[in-house]
Amino acid sequence: METLHNGTSARELSNRALIKEITGKVSVLAQKEFELAKAEIRADLKAELTMIKVLGFAAIAALIGVNLLLVAPILALALVIPGWLAALAVGGGILVTAAIVGYIGWRRHVTRPLLLTRQTLKEDMQWVKERLA
């Protein structure tokens, strides 16, 4: 036999009192679940913000590393040709490569979006017109 918070048993209460007791407990349960969800969201958000900070630091470190890797061939070429010409050659090579990759990527963009959907809609409209005629 379950004893309620006021010391009485559930069998001693009327239906109305039982419903009121259940409603109260459901309300408290919903409130506690809401508080738990808020606390979890705060903790998850804090963890995500920490992850973003760490990834940002990693991205900056990667950019610095790439820059240093690009300086290395310039310094190597500077032993043979003037430094400015070495930097120009390496920079030009990188720009040409970027332009080619960009062009290849651009050629892959969708020129006629939703082609299959438009075709099926056209067929559906034709079917409807035939049925209504």
Image (tube, rainbow, N blue to C red):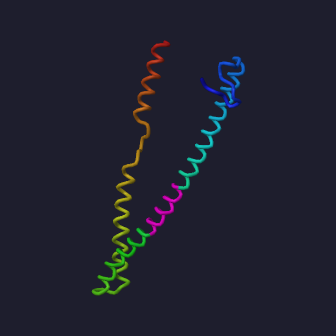
Residue 37 is drawn in which quadrant?
A: top right
Q: Position of residue 131 (x, y in %)?
A: 46, 13
Left or right side of 38 for 94: left
Q: Which residue is drawn at 38% across and 68% down?
A: 95
Residue at the left extreme, as displayed: 80
Q: Where is residue 133 in the image (x, y as percent from the top left)?
A: 49, 12
Q: Of residues 6 and 95, which is closer to you in this image?
A: 6
Magenta span dominant secondary structure: helix
Q: In this view, does 84 lie above or below 37?
A: below
Left or right side of 47 for 69: left
Left or right side of 93 for 124: right
Residue 127, magenta (yes or no): no
Q: Where is residue 65 in the image (x, y as percent from the top left)?
A: 39, 72
Q: Residue at x 41, y 36 (%)?
A: 115
Residue 59, magenta (yes or no): yes
Q: What range is drawn magenta here?
A: 47-60
Image quarter where the N terminus lies is top right
